[in-house]
Amino acid sequence: AETANGSIEVRKGGEQLTVQALIRATTQARADAVAVNTVTTNDGSVRITLDWPGGKRESNEGASLVITLPEASSLELRSSNGRIEVGPGFAASHAMLVSSNGAILVSDFAGKVFADTSNGRIELLDVNGANADTSNGAINVVLRDSAKGPVTLDTSNGAISLTFGSSLEGTIDLDTSNGSISVQAPRATSVSLDRSSGKVVLSAGGTSVLDTSNGSITVKQR
């Protein structure tokens, strides 16, 4: 699904896909003329887009989408200016969530989440993997016990918090140019910290990276 100047919310429920669109336009006539397109492609994907009258959206116009569906194998949601939220209960393998300005919020998601926003916080709770990037906002990730990693969490201005369970593997590299670092990882084989960086070794495996230019970093084993 793709929109501009509006949020996207995806909820699990119902027996078929439904789309509610909140249109903001310069005139009622233009709002009435907006077409919400739901197209099923050859591979079974469903693509949701909007057609604006005259083929062009005015700069102060936008649309928010609420999408309800019983299940999905994957999700790809894009907004050029707005919040993206995925509700609980999806068994999808992964989600690609991109916004140029707005928060990204996910809860109880069975797959890995790729979240990218240029201005807003990212909160991924009870997910099986995470790759999160924001230019201005905090990042909070809580991994499922089954999540093996690695994860990448990067913000240019904001705190980072990672909570992980019994399955996370490898090494966690920590870096902040201005902020404190706190680590609670009883099963780590080694933890080394200095004023602005740190390394947590859990086991053999890949490298998770937590990086912020201005903010604290908190790592906690559940």
Image (tube, rainbow, N blue to C red):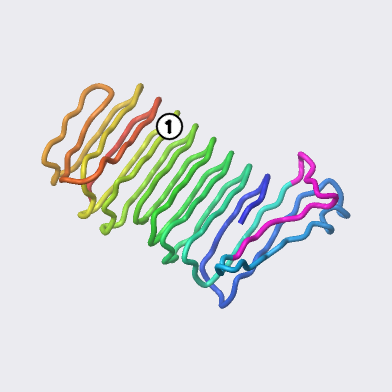
Is residue 18 placed above or below 60 in the rendered structure? below
Q: Is residue 58 magenta?
A: yes
Q: Is residue 106 magenta?
A: no
Q: Position of residue 2 (x, y in %)?
A: 63, 53
Considering depth in this image, is 38 or 157 the residue closer to the camera?
38
Considering depth in this image, is 130 or 32 the residue closer to the camera?
130
Name the residue tied to disc 1: 158
Most extreme residue toward the bottom is: 15
Q: Position of residue 193 (x, y in %)?
A: 20, 28
Most extreme residue toward the front is: 42
Is residue 197 placed above or below 63 in the rendered structure? above
Residue 211 vs residue 33: left or right?
left
**Magenta residue span:** 46-61
Q: Position of residue 16 (x, y in %)?
A: 59, 75
Q: How many marks?
A: 1
Is residue 103 placed above or below 2 in the rendered structure? above
Residue for point 66% across, 66% down: 39
Q: At numbered mark 1, what does the secondary structure look like: helix, strand or loop?
A: loop
Crowding at mark 1 (Cα within 10 Å: few <14, some 14-19, many 20+): many
Residue for point 47% across, 66% down: 73
Residue for point 39% across, 54% down: 112
Is residue 217 placed above or below 104 in the rendered structure? above
Say what amino acid the circle numbered 1 marks: Gly
